[in-house]
Image: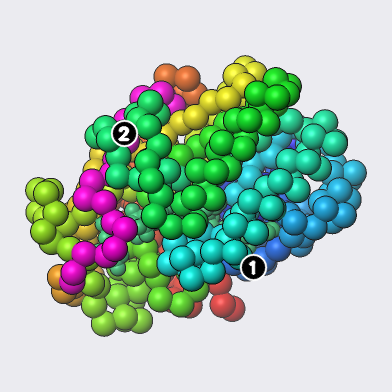
Amino acid sequence: MKILLTGGAGFIGSHTLIELDKAGHEAVVLDNLYNSSPLALKRAAEIIGKEVPFYQVDIRDREGLTKVFEAHQFDACIHFAGLKAVGESVEKPLEYYENNLNGTFVLLDVMRKHGCKNIIFSSSATVYGDPEIIPITEECPKGICTNPYGKTKSMLEDVLIDVQKADPEWNVVVLRYFNPIGAHPSGKLGDNPNGIPNNLMPYITQVAVGKRKELGVFGADYDTHDGTGVRDYIHVVDLGRAHVASLKAIEQKKGVAIYNIGTGTGYSVLDVVKAFVRVNGVDVPYVIKPRRSGDVAVNYCNPAKAKMELGWEAQYGIEDMCRDSWNWQKQNPNGFEE
Ligand code: NAD
Ligand code: UD1
């Protein structure tokens, strides 16, 4: 299939494009490079051994998008483009609503005008809020999102479902990612956060490489086996493959399909730190800090639906994730800076 990847220069998009290429699909990348580097696409091109068609366009730019759709007949769009920093979204709600909501509205309108009515949308486990069911199945009701970022994901899921309801020619696949970490095993691609990382793994790797003094563990008094928060970490290469597998739901014209994308196993913050130290033989000093506001104790999924309907399941375990995250960080201590 010929597939448009909005936000395809980002962390998950750049890994997905490699998996799409491996599976014989043709990927075209569109990104405004607000949170990514052209070097990611250069590295992806080295890995797949060919150039990646790229357009530096903002999804809110209707004219720019139209030109891309006039140049290509896409079978589907994988829509990664969006702003994703939880804390920043609390400080800049308008910017987040404007970019994520308005950008998606323009994209959907241009898609339908060009007869492309197949979309895979990057959603998040954050839509479950404090989950009612553990492990979380797709039947678990959505919860209250405590920040504008999470709200944009939840709202956009509803928008996509309504669009499909009004026009059954659409096929909408919603992927609720759990906690993507890891990196391409080559060490050429990986997560490249700006400034102080908010997420656990990039913080750990920056401590290990000597950029930060110690990890703050946010809370050791949760009701979990060691008191620290439990999450469902998933290797970004497995996540990329989940997008390839999701094309099956589009081929089968499923209408709306929602899948949890995780491994189904929860690890605590200290489990991850210990695995990282054990696998990589590096030290990660840490101190226990107060809980971070908005965090839940436990969040992991039951990924059985994706296995049953898409034939997808995660191949990599926590040790692979720790090894590949470190391999990326130590080869690129300053991310994509050349
Ligand atoms: P990322 O920031 O690395 O990639 C997103 C890309 O979208 C960036 O390259 C950015 O430049 C681009 N972008 C943003 N706004 C744009 C716009 N208006 N027009 C064109 N391009 C635009 O993030 P990621 O980690 O690769 O995440 C991809 C998607 O998955 C996002 O929608 C994110 O919210 C979602 N998601 C990520 C995680 C995670 O932990 N990384 C978890 C759940 C969901
Ligand atoms: C966070 C976001 C979520 C988003 C996801 C992916 C919040 C409340 N949730 O999920 O909306 O979809 O990232 O981008 O921000 N931790 C530490 N020290 C750190 C960093 C994290 O102890 O320096 C702990 C956290 O308390 C948590 C676990 O590590 O228990 C994972 O945190 P993180 O990587 O930020 O992911 P989530 O909070 O699950």
Q: Is residue 310 magenta?
A: no
Q: Is residue 300 magenta?
A: yes
Quadrant field for ligand 1: bottom right
- Disc 1 versus disc 2: distance between alpha carbons? 33 Å
Mark 1 crowdedness (10 Å alpha carbons): few <14, some 14-19, many ≥20: some
Across and down, in percent, residue 77 comes to 69, 39
Can residue 44 be seen by looking at this rendering? no
**Is residue 248 rendered to the left or right of residue 319?**
right
Across and down, in percent, residue 235 comes to 40, 47
Answer with the quarter of the image where residue 245 lies.
top right
Please state which of residues 247 and 302 is positioned toward the viewer in this rendering: 302
Answer with the quarter of the image where residue 23 lies.
top right
Which mark is in front, 1 or 2? 2
Q: Which residue is rendered at x = 40% and y = 29% of the image?
A: 138
Label the magenta part by its dominant secondary structure.
loop
The residue segment tinted magenta is 289-307
> Does ligand 2 reach within 8 Å of label 2's beta carbon?
no
Q: Which residue is mark 2?
A: 136
Q: Which residue is mark 1?
A: 34
Can residue 140 be seen by looking at this rendering? yes
Which amino acid type is shown beneath numbered disc 1? Tyr
SS at mark 2 in the image: loop
> Does ligand 1 reach within 8 Å of label 1's beta carbon?
yes
Across and down, in percent, residue 116 comes to 78, 33
Q: Which residue is rendered at x = 62% and y = 54% of the image?
A: 100
Q: Which residue is rendered at x = 46% and y = 65% of the image?
A: 90
| 51 in relation to 89, above or below | above
Which amino acid type is shown beneath numbered disc 2? Ile
Please state which of residues 182 and 218 is positioned toward the viewer in this rendering: 218
Mark 2 crowdedness (10 Å alpha carbons): few <14, some 14-19, many ≥20: some
